[in-house]
Image (cartoon, rainbow, N blue to C red):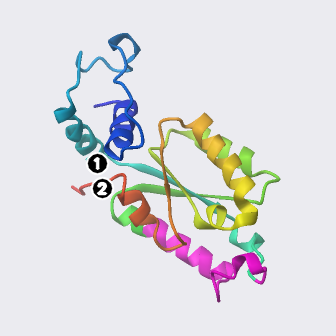
Amino acid sequence: MYSQNYIHFYHLTECGIGKAKIPEPSLRTEPIVRAISESSLPFLKMEKAMTEVSVLMVGLQPDLIDFSDPAYAAFPGMTAEKVMAGLNADQARLTALGYHASLCLVDFGETAERVLHERLGEKPVDCVMLGAGLRLIAKNTALFEKLLAVVHRTSPNATICFNTGPTDSAEAVGRWFPPPQRA
C-alpha cells in the first residue's frame, strides 16, 4: 500500500499545480522503493482508486440559509429542503459508486471551524469537498478561507475539491479519484 503523501504528490504534479520533489528516503512514511520514476506514478493513482476513498462533504447547514437574500439569487427556487435532499442524494450516489462519503454541515462561523476540525480529527480522509454555498457566495468568502485553512492544517494530505451545487459532488470527487471498483 502506498502512503497518501505519494498519492497527493501525484495528484499535484498530474494537474500541474506544482512540481514537488519526491521526499528523501529518510522522510518517506513507507519504505517502498528508493526512487520512483515518473513512469511509475500512474500506478500510484490506480492503487488508491482500488481502495475505498473516504470523502467528507462540507457545506452550510441548509436550514440556516436565507434563500430570499439577494446573495443567493443565483440559485432561484432553492430551499433548505431541496438543498438537503440534493446533499443526501449526492452522498448516496457517492456511496453507490464505492466511496465512503459523509456530510459535515456547519454554521456561518460561530462553531464552523471547530466542528470541521473535530470532524477531520476523528479519522483521516482522502478527499474534502467544499460546497458551492461556501465558495460561490461572496459574503461567505471569509468563512470559506477559514474552513480551507482548517482542512490544510488538520488534513494536509487530503485532496480538496469543489462542487457547483448540491447535486454534482460525485463529479467533483471523480475528477481526483476515479470511482472505486466494486467487488
How many marks on residues? 2
The residue at the far bottom in this view is 77
Left or right: where 78 falls relative to 180: right
Extreme residue toward the right, this view: 110
| Magenta part, dominant SS | helix
Compared to residue 147, the image places residue 173 above or below, namely below
Residue visible at 23% across and 19% down?
35
Residue 112 in the image: state x and y as whole percent. 74, 52
Residue at (47, 57) in percent of width and height: 101
Q: Position of residue 110 (x, y in %)?
A: 83, 53
Position of 118 relative to 55 (above/below): above
Q: Secondary structure at mark 2?
A: loop
The residue labelled by disc 1 is: 49
> Looking at the rendering, in which quadrant would you find the N terminus?
top left
Q: Nearer the viewer, residue 147 or 87?
A: 147
Say what secondary structure mark 1 lies in: helix
Q: Are marks 1 and 2 in contact (CB under 8 Å)?
A: yes
Instruction: Please tell me in which quadrant of the rendered image residue 26 appears.
Output: top left
Give the percent coordinates (x, y) of residue 57: 54, 58
Marked residue nearer the N-terminal end (1 or 2): 1
Quarter holding residue 70 = bottom right
The residue range painted magenta reads: 68-92
Q: Which mark is residue 178?
A: 2
